[in-house]
Image (cartoon, grey):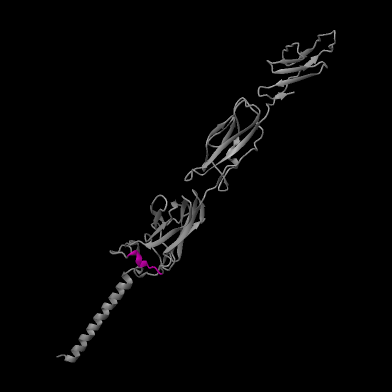
Amino acid sequence: MINPAKKILMLNSWNMNETRNKLILLFFTVFVFIPKVYSQNNADPGIGVLMSPSSVTQGSTGILSATVGNYGNGTIVENSFRVTISVGSSAEIIGIAPGSDSRWSQLSLTTGSANSIKLTNTVGAFNSFDVGDILLTVRGNALSVPELILGNIVYISAQNPALCGSCASPPLNVSQGNASTLNDNSQTSLAITVSVIEAVNDSSYATQTPGTTGTIVGNVTSNDSLNGVLVTASNTDVTPITTGPLSIDADGVLTLAANTASGTYNITYQLCEVGSNPSNCDSATVTVSVGCEQIQAPTVSITGTDKLTCTATTVTRTATGGGTYSWNTSPRHRLKRLLLRLHLNYLDKFLLLYKLLNNCLAC
């Protein structure tokens, strides 16, 4: 028969062994079967935004850089973050710019001024102290003083299978930790200034020679500027106009009409910005000089030596070259049909002029 005291000692020993075995099993379950990521809580999502340049002219664009990622230890898996960026009432986010961190994809983008964009890291994870730049194109739509641009990063409120593989109940994204909330929000600013368009008066064109067809003189916008930069056909328009023999088309091409008489001609045109600021316009005047048509005068000779006297009331002169001549009794003789004028005086001096249709004279 077993001593009762000894029996109690044996029972206590058995209970202690059983408790020890359970503790060993629990330890094995916690540290072997539960993935390490369940206990990860030392990551630090963060964002910093910067607008470059900090001021743009109305209708032009700049680049907003949002430096986003993990500013702490550990790893943050894909589909963990949501970034939201919003602009002020005078600006508009156009979209993701080239060179942006490819780990981010656009979740949504509203339209118009004061819009916002949301992005998620659906394409990649972030290692410890791993950040990248989201690049956005932002346009200034209306004149304004500096207005705030706000950036925010949060964990997506959902379980994430990437945290534990195929476990039945994945941990929440937030379980990855947020060492500091001070970098969860960031802000910058953007000012929108007036767009300066300048159409410049121009009288530097070479003297033009008229022809039987129209002549392109040049482009009136070649010295015009928009915000200090030479304009292009894509950012400005010219209002077509015709004044006298000069005409300008929508691209600024200046044309001189055919058979234009010699002289100086002026034409005034209007240059306007295209896009979001079409009322931004300026005017300028162009001056074009038209010279004589360059032709060779005919070679003409006049022969005869007899002179007028009181008794010799007629003389004989023979003109050759340039065509047929007709004479009259006046000291001044004109050949109208051939536009040739022959001047005769009593001193036997002759001047021959070849007169053109545009009033130019070649001696």
Residue lying at 66% horizontally and 22% vertically, measured from the top left: 357
Residue lying at 51% horizontally and 56% vertically, measured from the top left: 54
Residue lying at 19% horizontally and 88% vertically, measured from the top left: 8
Vertical arrangement, residue 97 with respect to residue 71, above or below: above
Q: Give the farthest residue toward the left.
A: 1
Q: From the top left corner, tell me how far across and down residue 159 is, in percent.
A: 31, 62
Taking the image as shown, residue 202 lies to the left or right of residue 136, namely right
| Quadrant of the snapshot with the N terminus | bottom left
Vertical arrangement, residue 288 with respect to residue 101, above or below: above
**Residue 323: quarter of image:** top right
**Residue 131: quarter of image:** bottom left
Taking the image as shown, residue 100 lies to the left or right of residue 248, namely left
Vertical arrangement, residue 226 with respect to residue 131, above or below: above
Q: 357 or 36: nearer the eye? A: 357
Q: From the top left corner, tell me how far across and down residue 343 is, in percent.
A: 76, 17
Bounds of the magenta segment = 172-179
Q: 287 or 113: nearer the eye? A: 287
Q: 142 or 169: nearer the eye? A: 142
So how many labels did they put on this image? Answer: 0
